Amino acid sequence: MTPIETRFDELQEKLKGAEKVVISGHQNADGDAVGAVGALRRHLEIEDKDVTALLLEPLSPRYGFMEFGKHYQVFDPESHGALIDDADLFIMCDLSTWGRLGPLSKVVEESDVSTVCFDHHPCENGGPADINLLDPKATATGRIAWDYINHVEGHVDREIAESVFVSICSDTGWFRYPNTSGSVMDLAAELSKFRLDLPAIYRAIYQSNSAAMLRLLGHATRTMNEECGGRFVWSFIRRRFIEDLGVERFDADPILDVMRSGDQVQVVALFTEQADGSVSVSLRSRGEPDMNVIARQFGGGGHVYASGTSFPPNTAEHDIRSMVALIRRVLRAE
């Protein structure tokens, strides 16, 4: 039995005595976080648990086709604080640091609820939770959720299959990134047998940008900074510009994908001002340098190819300059 299978057994045993379970992903939940939360929510529902799935923001429209979209709530401190205090177990998906839970982190940490972490990002100190189901070699966190459900011989239905497929297709860039393997393709084929409309899923995730979002993409690339001989590109988007264009739901992924498509580009950084003056940071690379190492120096995390963090309003400008300078130094040292 592998180490993670031992922890699967530990979680299964823990769940035997748990009735109320709360599950959440990280802030600005991407396809992997949404998929992992969705798969585990449905699994626990089938197991007759009183399960609540929380997201920190409304589900991105690109994932609106998912059955999961009918079964989650947007976190509200006033209404959900008591829910978490009363829960037997809190499961967080696709994050290795408490900070990525945003305002939910304080509520969980101040409660007595037992915690579980499903994640495929490199993690320090063995993980943040009481039970950590971590596998940095896994293609996606949704794959770990799938492995757990299969390990405990859970029933799999279309909702679970759809959720896991969204996880793996998102974190492989629709099977284009280096983390795509034969086993990933085998799993995708297995999941597709659950009446998944693959062309429709692709269109929803990758071809559903509004006209306002396309204009914002143009602004981000037009004002893009190019450094280190084109190996490093970065852009800063102010909140007022997002609002002026009428972008209802900002999504960094389309912008990051275009910026990363440059033939010389190794590293992409996108800094996006939020309504409260803080700045959300999205980092991407082709594998070198390690984006997780960069993000961790600024309180964030992730994995080699994709990581993120956020900067508070009072230090955001200084933090942006510091991060840009650090990436420059790393690239020049290679």
Image (spheres, rainbow, N blue to C red):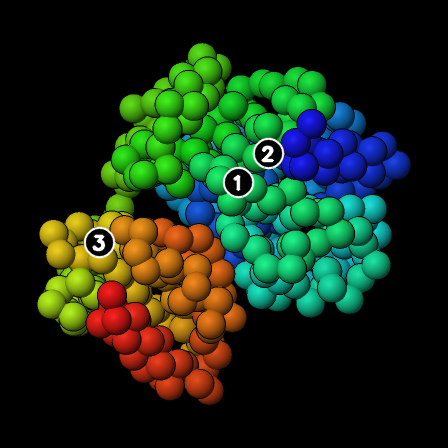
Picture layout, residue 198 above or below residue 334: above
What residue is disc 2 on?
145
Q: Earlier in the sequence, mark 2 or mark 3?
A: 2
* Residue 158 spot, x, y in % from top left: 53, 19
Mark 2 and mark 1 residues within 8 Å of each other at the beta carbon: yes
Q: How far apart are marks 2 and 3 (CA)?
A: 29 Å
Residue pictured at 51% horizontal, 44% vertical: 136
What residue is disc 3 on?
260
* Residue 34 spot, x, y in % from top left: 51, 42
Q: In this view, does 286 lie to the left or right of 296?
A: left
Q: In this view, does 257 lie to the left or right of 190?
A: left
Kind of residue indicated by mark 2: Ala
Q: Which of marks 3 and 1 is nearer the N terminus?
A: 1
**Crowd class of label 1 (few under 14; some 14 to 19; many from 20; radius 10 Å):** many
Q: How far apart are marks 2 and 1 (CA)?
A: 6 Å
Kind of residue indicated by mark 1: Thr
